[in-house]
Image (cartoon, grey):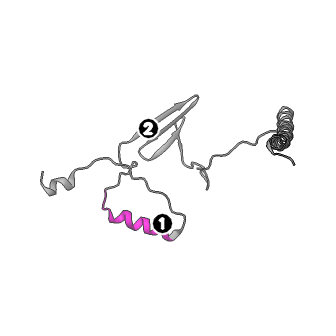
Amino acid sequence: MTHAEAIQFQMPTALTVPLPQRATDRQALRRQLRRLQLTWFNPALGALTTRIKAGTADVQYQAGTYQLNGRVVADLDVGPGWWRQRQPKRQVRWIDRYFQAQSHVLLVLFMVIGAVLLVFGVLGYRVYRRMFIKSD
């Protein structure tokens, strides 16, 4: 295989880069990608067709258009921050408060028991030490 033939060899490859936060870093990334001299795949021009069926929803992509249940979708209604996973608001129930209070009571109880054992340990050490010290 000659060098000219090697250049025309094409292999599908995914290029993954972290998205910079600053505009200057994004421009530098664009310049770096342009310098790679790659042929980028355009799914709108290719014969790429995908289809996902989930329950009653049928989502399909074909030749650059998205279809939902057979109808073309013009606006995907994607706003800024769509990639962030939204956490549902957690409802605090009485049983949760009960177990939380119970865990606090047990924590205080174990701390008191630990302090008492520490005091007994210090007193026992002193008594044990006095047994072997000669008194005049």
Q: Which residue is mark 1?
A: 26
- Give the distance between the C-alpha atoms of the residues marked 2 and 1, in whole angstroms: 30 Å
Residue at horizontal 42%, vertical 53%? 16
Residue at horizontal 72%, vertical 42%? 88
State the SS at label 2. strand
Residue type (three-letter) at the residue carrying disc 1 = Arg
Q: Which residue is mark 2?
A: 50
Is residue 73 shown left or right of residue 127? left
**Which x, y percent locates residue 101?**
86, 37
User: What is the quadrant of residue 129 in the picture?
Assistant: top right
Q: Magenta stretch?
A: 24-38
Disc 2 crowd, CA 10 A, few/some/many (<14, 14-19, 20+): few
First-in-chain label (2 vs 1):
1
Q: How many badges with numbers are in the image?
A: 2
Residue type (three-letter) at the residue carrying disc 2 = Thr
Is residue 99 shown left or right of residue 64? right
